[in-house]
Image: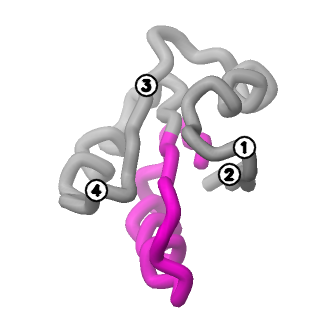
Amino acid sequence: MTLYNSSPFLRESIESVLEQTFRDFEFVVIDDASTDDSLNIINTYNDERIVVYRNNCNKGIIGTRKNCHIFHKNRHFRALKV
């Protein structure tokens, strides 16, 4: 999931993914250099399925999604945007 300054919707989005009936997955979250509380919210979750990366600078949705394949272990993934 890519995000940028998504704190108002972030908890609902994360919980929606974590509450899926399928449990064996890696949830890659890429923060696009948010300036709000998004990264702090993500870090409150203690779930080994969540893997968090943060861009050093804002790359925009296209720039961030181009790098999604670098961060996940499996060859199958689905990009989500908050």
First-in-chain label (3 vs 1)? 3
The residue lying toward the viewer, choosing from 5 and 1, is 1
The amino acid type, in three-letter code, at marker 4 is Glu
| 22 is within the stretch colored magenta | yes
Of the pair 74 and 1, the residue shown nearer to us: 74
Q: N-terminal of the two: label 3 or label 4?
A: 4
* Picture residue at 66% right of the left edge, 32% below the top: 68
Percent of width and height locating residue 17 = 52, 71
Residue behind mark 3? 54
Q: How many marks?
A: 4
Q: Is residue 81 toward the left or the right of residue 44 in the image?
A: right
Considering the numbered disc 4 on the image, is that residue within a helix, a strand or a loop? loop
In the rendered structure, which amino acid carries the disc numbered 2? Answer: Lys
The mark closer to the camera, 3 or 4, is 4
Q: Which residues are magenta?
A: 1-29
Instruction: Name the residue beneath numbered marker 1.
Output: 75
- Tell me, yes or no, whether the highlighted magenta stretch contains residue 79: no
Give the class, few, some or many, for how many residues have Cα within 10 Å of label 4's Cα (few <14, many ≥20).
few
For disc 4, the marked residue is 48
Q: Is residue 27 left or right of residue 78?
A: left
